[in-house]
Image (cartoon, rainbow, N blue to C red):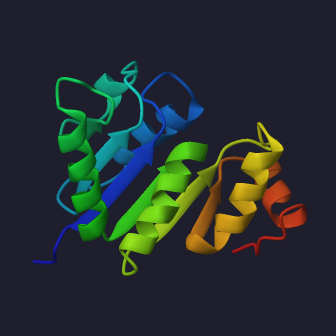
Amino acid sequence: MTERVQLVYIINSLGVGGAEIGMCRLFDGLDANSYDITVFALDEHTAVAHQIPSWVNVVRLRSASQGRLRAGWRLFQSIYNADVIVGSLFHAAMFAKLGGLLNRDASVATWRHRTVFKTKKREIAFKWTTRLTDVVLADSEAVAEILIDDLRLENH
């Protein structure tokens, strides 16, 4: 029997949006016997939490009920033991990239969901930290074109 893949998925929110719905669809397509998944949500929104399969662990980092320090320690431990770290949306992607520095053996994937950055500072931070991710995932052809043409990322 092969070991289950330890996947850490960091997302800004479990609110209703394309990134959150896409995450739920991704999990629905994965085999529960092959993956051990922990989702870390950076805020307290829970609108799509009921759409996450029951075999996926969910930790809300700002939740007072779990204790923020304990949740932060769990994030640290999960990243340290991860095979794959995924970050979705800007802040979560930055956490994932930093997680890759902690666990050099993990594969790091970050999502890019928008064609335009909210601020110039975010665009610069994204460019400077892109080397910390193994793959940048685009959720549309338009985003892929921006990543390839404007940010000079390679197309694979």
Q: Is residue 26 visible?
A: no
Q: Quadrant of residue 113?
A: top right
* Residue at the limit of the structure toward the bottom, as seen here: 105
Tell me if 144 is positioned left or right of 51 in this view.
right
Query: The N terminus lies in which quarter of the figure?
Result: bottom left
Task: Where is residue 127? Give x, y as percent.
Answer: 74, 63
* Residue at the limit of the structure toward the right, as seen here: 149
Q: Quadrant of residue 7?
A: bottom left
Is residue 27 or residue 120 the one in the foreground? 120
* Residue at the limit of the structure toward the front, as seen here: 69
Query: The C terminus lies in which quarter of the figure?
Result: bottom right
At 50% from the left edge and 22% from the top edge, which residue is drawn? 16
At 37% from the left edge and 23% from the top edge, which residue is drawn? 44
Q: Is residue 43 visible?
A: yes
Q: Quadrant of residue 8?
A: bottom left
Tell me if 65 is positioned left or right of 43 in this view.
left
At 17% from the left edge and 43% from the top edge, which residue is drawn? 70
Task: Where is residue 22? Give x, y as percent.
Answer: 51, 39
- How many marks can you see? 0
Is residue 116 or residue 19 the one in the foreground? 116
Task: Where is residue 25? Give x, y as percent.
Answer: 43, 40
Task: Where is residue 111? Give x, y as percent.
Answer: 59, 52
Tell me if 149 is positioned left or right of 36 in this view.
right
Is residue 139 or residue 103 the one in the foreground? 103
At 64% from the left edge and 74% from the top edge, which residue is drawn? 131
* Residue at the limit of the structure toward the left, as seen here: 1
